Amino acid sequence: MADYYEILGVSRDADKDEIKQAFRRLARKYHPDVNKESGAEERFKEINRAYEILSEPETRARYDRFGEAGVASGAGAGYPDFGDMGFADIFESFFSGFGGVGQQTGRRRGGPVRGDDLRLDLKLDFREAVFGGEKEIRIPHLETCQVCDGTGAKPGTRPRTCPTCNGTGQVRRATRTPFGSFTQVSVCPSCNGEGQIIEEKCDSCGGAGRKQETKKLKITIPAGVDNGTRLRVSKEGDAGVRSGSPGDLYVYLFVEEDENFERDGINILSEITISYLQAILGCRLEVETVDGPVELTIPPGTQPNTVLTLENHGVPKLGNPVSRGEHLITVLIDIPNRITPEERELLEKLAKIKGDRTGKGGLEGFLGGLFRG
């Protein structure tokens, strides 16, 4: 499944302006009028789809919570409306910035860094997926070291600003040429891009500021989830660095098969086998559903492979658990290979009566007429 944040190259806590800027930059790069390379058009459609989902707060919230399943019927993947953005704007975007190379300052590497997102695959049994509920999970993740409070320095000491890069984490070297001034930027070799130097490391975390821990969590499974549904648990990923916000935990759900039921969207399918006499005469039977035993009426003269419907006994609609699908029951009829002499005598009498009325006698013709198809 596509990760729309990854497609646009933005973080999961990016604001609307960041998403819009990323979209405009990528759209110009992969627009079919500009980029004739193989695959550029498909890439452009992906970018547009990602922007349509993430630019609207409501669809973005559904996507964050349920993944692709939450926006499956959302916006299409056509070309966006660029308004007054013509080819000149796109052409200009390729060359904007060349005149001012070396003028922008690099991002401060020593500031807060958001923690990584984590993924957990979770198995559910059939009924858990249908009705949802609470589930306890255990996740190994990085937590802020409590001894040094995330600084990585031994208690009583603090990291100091790197004197080589003055805390930026980068060193620059300017070169003058006939075409202008160019600046080469590289990672600071003294602090390895951190912007600070720890002289006495914390004994508990070894200077990392974080430690690997296993944590117990209770998460809520919404009713109606299916294979591949993705749940987002906010701020339960790895801890951030230097007071950065923690990442998120993404739980991917996988539903185990059930020996009695099969799922088709929000409908549940199952089979029931009845005797030929029950099919002829009709009856009332108790059948198993995800809600428990329910009484089912078999109409007289029921034919093989007839599908009977139990309304509101299917899967709740994801995001709207009040609305449920149906339970569709296929009726199979057990016709015995052997019958007792008494049964045969009674059936032949019935076949004779039926034959007298229709002009077609015989037990085989009688039974064949009862169970067409």
Image (cartoon, helix red, strand yellow):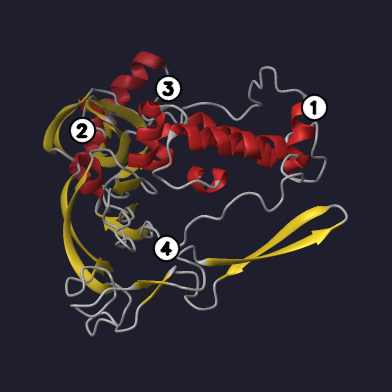
Name which quarter of the figure residue 371 lies in: top left
Q: Which residue is mark 3?
A: 360
- Per the model, the C-alpha gap separating discs 3 and 2 is 24 Å
Tag 1: Cα neighbours inside 10 Å, few (<14), some, or many (≥20)? few
Q: Earlier in the sequence, mark 2 or mark 1?
A: 1
Looking at the picture, which amino acid does disc 3 mark? Lys
- Per the model, the C-alpha gap separating discs 2 and 1 is 77 Å
Looking at the picture, which amino acid does disc 2 mark? Gln
Q: Which residue is mark 1?
A: 88
Q: Is residue 218 above or below residue 23?
A: below
* Residue at (28, 48) in percent of width and height: 234
Nearer to me, 337 or 66? 66
Tag 4: Cα neighbours inside 10 Å, few (<14), some, or many (≥20)? many
- Per the model, the C-alpha gap separating discs 3 and 1 is 85 Å
Name which quarter of the figure residue 262 lies in: top left
Looking at the picture, which amino acid does disc 1 mark? Ala
Looking at the picture, which amino acid does disc 4 mark? Gly
Q: Earlier in the sequence, mark 3 or mark 1?
A: 1
Question: Closer to the observer: label 3 or label 1?
Answer: 1
